[in-house]
Image (cartoon, rainbow, N blue to C red):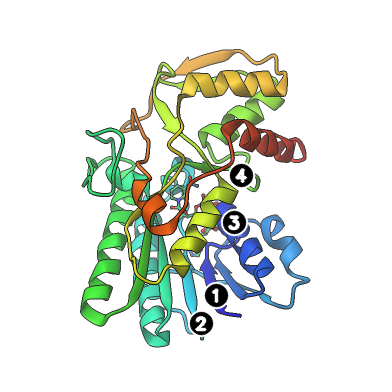
Amino acid sequence: MKRILVTGGAGFIGSHLCKKLLQQGHKVICLDNMYTGTYENIKSFHENKNFDFINADITSPIELEIDQIYNLACPASPVHYQHDPIMTAKTSFLGALNVLELAKKNKARVLQASTSEIYGDPLIHPQTEKYRGNVNTIGPRACYDEGKRIAETLFFDYQRQYGVDIRVVRIFNTYGPNMLKNDGRVISNFIVQALNNEDITIYGDGTQTRSFCYVDDLVDGLIKMMENDNFSGPVNLGNPHEMTVYELAQIIIEKTGSNSRIVYNDLPEDDPIKRKPVIKLAKEKLNWQPIVSISEGLDRTIEYFKTKI
Ligand SMILES: NC(=O)c1ccc[n+]([C@@H]2O[C@H](COP(=O)([O-])OP(=O)(O)OC[C@H]3O[C@@H](n4cnc5c(N)ncnc54)[C@H](O)[C@@H]3O)[C@@H](O)[C@H]2O)c1
């Protein structure tokens, strides 16, 4: 049994990670400032004596005794991270600094939830970990993209300078239950609009592609990376199955039996046109690959949102 800190544990991915770690019998300390996290996501864990919740901000130093840290604290959807971009940059940088200091003191292993956004609007396709990215440093997405890039830099500098035991994963689009209804991510948006029989809004012409990973697969990958003793990363975790945003809208309309029409809006600034991970490294080093199909994952996510609407 390990003492494990999950920052951002009340959020979408964090809540699934806490659940899995509790099932494995660990002591889980969830630290969250509830910016995009919800009490609903962690409500069921409170009866478990191995679960603790700390309402705190990752931009302040943390004092705890722990064996492992998963650093997930950071709003992940453009609507939320652009709402207060300076806070997003602070969360990314100071949050990384504070968890690294805590790991250094405790001699703990620390995993950073980085992102495919560090590749920006990629000039090569699909993206391997060797690709260094194409990020607009002054655009509206930069608070997040550059925040996550400097966090990766800090992680590797703490490894080089202090020997901190780091793990860095680059997460590609992930979806599933516990996403917020209103966070503007494409899958939650389309499902909520379809269930309400509202127009489904596609930004751009719908030919941009995305690849979507179901959250259970992603959580397995995070834990495999944490438990791996010889590999710091960075490693891509995502589902390489690529589809256009238009195709996604069609599948969701069909699955929900919705009367929604598809309408088109302008593409937001710096929105990436293509995104697809190469997961060769994750397969080789972690023996990991996603197993939940988009059809099955969407069914589970639609069932979840039906209970929220
Ligand atoms: N969901 C994805 O597709 C995706 C893709 C790439 C990377 N990621 C990364 O994974 C992590 C989790 O993403 P998510 O989708 O669960 O997002 P989320 O917004 O649901 O969860 C983030 C959590 O962090 C908390 N938080 C934010 N700022 C904080 C702060 N300053 N102090 C303490 N807590 C804070 C929020 O309240 C929330 O509970 C994020 O770091 C995100 O960048 C997610």
Q: Distance between the residues labelled 2 and 1?
A: 6 Å
Picture coordinates of residue 143 (x, y %)?
A: 33, 50
Indicate the amino acid at tag 3: Gly
Query: Do labels 2 and 4 touch, CB within 8 Å?
Result: no
Question: Residue 277, how many percent across, how many down?
Answer: 37, 40
How far apart marks 3 and 4 lie (CA) works out to 9 Å
> Which residue is tagged 4?
180
Position of residue 165 relative to residue 41, above or below, is below
The residue type indicated by label 4 comes to: Leu
Residue 122 in the image: state x and y as whole percent.
26, 36
Q: Residues within 10 Å of mark 1 (few under 14, many from 20)?
A: many
Whole-angstrom CA distance, mark 2 to mark 3, is: 22 Å
| Nearest the eye: 209 or 78 | 209
Label 2 vs 3, first from the N-terminus: 3
Q: Nearer the viewer, mark 2 or mark 4?
A: 2
Residue at 52 percent of width and 32 percent of height = 186
Q: Given the image, on which type of amino acid does mark 1 rest?
A: Ile
Q: Is residue 34 above or below residue 52?
A: above
Q: How far apart are marks 3 and 1 (CA)?
A: 18 Å
Q: Is residue 16 rendered to the left or right of residue 106?
A: right
Mark 2: few, some, or many residues within 10 Å (few <14, many ≥20)?
many
| Kind of residue sitting beneath label 2 | Ile
For the point 54% across and 56% down, which residue is it?
220
Answer yes or no: do the residues labelled 2 and 1 have beta carbons within 8 Å?
Answer: yes
Residue 4: image tag: 1
**Mark 3, residue position:** 37
Quadrant, the N terminus: bottom right
Q: Of the residues under marks 2 and 1, which one precedes in the sequence? A: 1
Q: Is mark 4 within 8 Å of ligand 1?
A: yes
Circle nearer the N terminus (3, 4):
3
